[in-house]
Amino acid sequence: TAPSIDYNTVFTNSKAGMDDVDKEYVKKVVFEMSKDSNFFKNQERMSASSTEKIRKTKEQLASLTQAEAEQGERWADAVIGKLEEARNLSRTYIHVDMDMFFATCL
């Protein structure tokens, strides 16, 4: 399949000086600069593979009988119950991510 400019990217203009940046222009430039890279091609392959797996899973789900769906739901609820019993909430973790702008201000 041909690469498409309609791909998902993460873009934030919440940093200082980025308020007036044209998001669509940046998206287009990033796409044009990266569309022939091995990384981009691999991401396209992985996306196509995921899409196919989702399609097959939806097809299988649609073919289940009501009884099979209920049996699967009971099984999932039992697994969730066991996982909930084993959860350890006695610790608190914190992750702080500071980019270089904030690090230089310290």
Image (cartoon, rainbow, N blue to C red):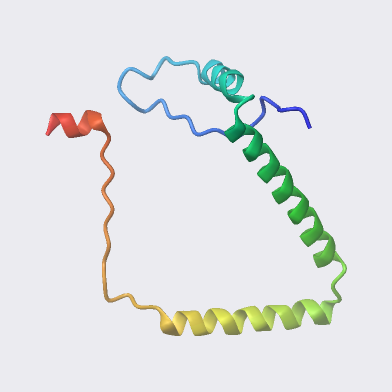
Classify residue 64 by image quadrant.
bottom right
Residue 24's place in the image compared with 88, above or below, is above
Residue 11's place in the image compared with 32, above or below, is below
Which quarter of the figure is the N terminus placed in? top right
x and y percent of residue 56 in the render? 81, 58
Residue pictured at 77% horizontal, 76% vertical: 69
Which residue in the rendered view is the most extreme toward the left?
106
x and y percent of residue 53 in the render? 75, 55
Horizontal relation, residue 11 to residue 92: left or right: right
Residue nearest the viewer, comparing 40 with 22: 40
Residue pictured at 60% horizontal, 27% vertical: 37
Which quarter of the figure is the C terminus placed in? top left
Residue nearest the viewer, comparing 42 with 30: 42
x and y percent of residue 42 in the render? 64, 39
Classify residue 29 by image quadrant.
top right
Residue nearest the viewer, comparing 66 with 95: 95
Horizontal relation, residue 23 to residue 56: left or right: left
Residue nearest the viewer, comparing 42 with 51: 42
x and y percent of residue 30 in the render? 54, 22
Q: Please give the count of numbered marks on the rendered protein.
A: 0
Horizontal relation, residue 40 to residue 85: left or right: right
Residue pictured at 30% horizontal, 22% vertical: 16
Residue pictured at 55% horizontal, 33% vertical: 9
Residue 92's place in the image compared with 54, above or below, is below
